[in-house]
Amino acid sequence: MIKNLGLILLSTIFLINSCTPDRPKNVKAVFDIPNLIEKDIDEIRKILGKPDEDFIETTEPGRQTWDNTFKKQGSLLSVSFDPKSRAVNFIYLAPPGDDWTKKDVMKLGNLDSPSAKYWIERGSKFNMDGDYSTIRVIPS
């Protein structure tokens, strides 16, 4: 009985681990954030395509921020922008799954280090389709 319980427990742990997406060993860029950071939301949409939201624009008068989300290879890029000026306020980048280092998330965005064009903050975890470790990229 105890032997069977141990076997069931071990099998369950193996099954859970095999269903959890692993972080790739060699992280490659999914988004080119340095190329996007100085563009307005209309230029970003031309590069990345249609955002995932049903409502890509706000109809609320006086609204100062709006977000568009783009998904690619499991990663999520959320662009916060001013609907009137079309300027980007900041970009969030979230990898698929958990257990990502800031350095690896930066690689997903083709970011090496802060530059004169932007600065980087380590984001918190937020929940869209699961938990993500994020970074926030802010234009200078």
Image (spheres, rainbow, N blue to C red):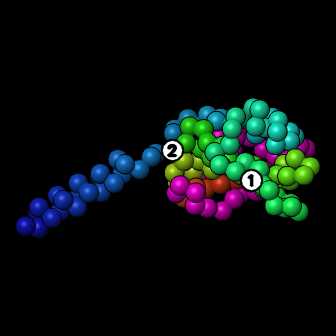
Quarter of image, res 62 = bottom right
Q: Which residue is mark 2?
A: 23
- Check if residue 114 falls in the magenta segment: yes
Residue that appears at 82% across and 51% down: 81
Residue that lies at the very extreme toward the top in this rendered image = 47
Residue that appears at 80% across and 56% down: 59
Percent of width and height locating residue 106: 69, 44
Task: State the count of labels.
Answer: 2
- Residue 112 visible in the displayed image: no
- Check if residue 105 falls in the magenta segment: yes
Secondary element at tag 2: loop
Residue that appears at 34% across and 54% down: 16
Direction from residue 124 to residue 18 in the image, left or right: left
Find the magenta span and give its range.
101-130
Direction from residue 120 to residue 11 in the image, left or right: left
Foreground of the two, 55 or 82: 55
Give the Cα distance between marks 1 and 2: 27 Å
- The amino acid pointed to by label 2 is Arg
Q: Is residue 97 above or below residue 71?
A: below
Q: Which residue is mark 1?
A: 67
